[in-house]
Amino acid sequence: MQTNPQKEPSAPTGGDDPVTGPGPAPEDCLASTYFLDHADPAIQAFVAEHTEAGADRQSNAVRLYFAVRDGLRYNPYKVSLEHNAYRISRVVALRQSYCIPKAMLFAGVCRAIGVPARLGFGDVKNHLSSERLIDFLGTDLFAYHGYAEVYLNDRWVQATPAFDRVLCRKFGVAPLDFNGEEDSLFQEFAGDGHKFMEYINYHGTSADLPFDWLMQGMTAAYPKVFAQRCQVIDLDGDLMNEA
């Protein structure tokens, strides 16, 4: 008997823009969604591999943070404009990605262990970058930098799993650790004590990826990159080789 192949769910349209202030409530930040599809077997397998049975949620959230931070290398040169490329069940299979998909993956795997998690966005100066990357983007302002917020011990804690340990070592900065209790948002100073990174503008938080809002904003922020109007921005580059 012939069976029909499983059809991928339709991508959502619109979506809620990030909000400043209190943001989405914890109870609204647990569901498996089109983008944060943590019920997918690939995500469940990742969670099982990187958590410890019987451990508390905070300890396992910390384990998952390091698994995402160092398991996917940070490389900002390949940016997709397709909805399905941002589903974390696809992101988890990548060997490298940039800040937003990595923040999404961390948020999704935290939800998978029962920890509420949401996405945050901000504009950053003095970012981990190279002259070639700045030329590629056409600006030294890195717009819509993605991070995650997880709800532990009755409060939201910020976490940025973007920059892997090996890349940070090459740039001479300490990697961002995370203990589940203190915010871990950005490297303010380089190893030599000089100012390294600062957030210029916070866009707020969202319970799911606000895809349309994000693509519109990135197109406006990076007209040089998005002028091609293609589905994948695919420059042959690797920030690891430009440190």
Image (spheres, helix red, strand yellow):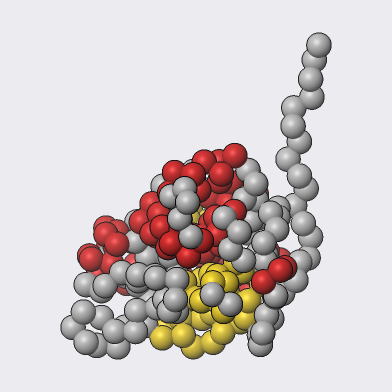
Residue at image position (30%, 88%) is: 195
Left/right placement of residue 140 relative to residue 15 reads left
Left/right placement of residue 155 relative to residue 63 reads right
Query: Residue 38 appears at what percent x and percent y?
Result: 62, 50
Q: Quadrant of residue 9?
A: top right
Is residue 77 placed above or below 26 in the rendered structure? above
Q: Quadrant of residue 44?
A: top right
Is the C terminus in the top left, top right, bottom left or bottom right quadrant?
bottom left
Res 64 seen here: no
Res 193 seen here: yes
Residue farthest along the left direction in this orientation: 192
Residue at image position (21%, 79%) is: 191
Query: Residue 141 appears at what percent x and percent y?
Result: 46, 81
Given residues 221 and 48, the one toward you in this image is 48
Residue at image position (57%, 55%) is: 113
Is the N terminus in the top left, top right, bottom left or bottom right quadrant?
top right
Given residues 129 and 189, the one toward you in this image is 189
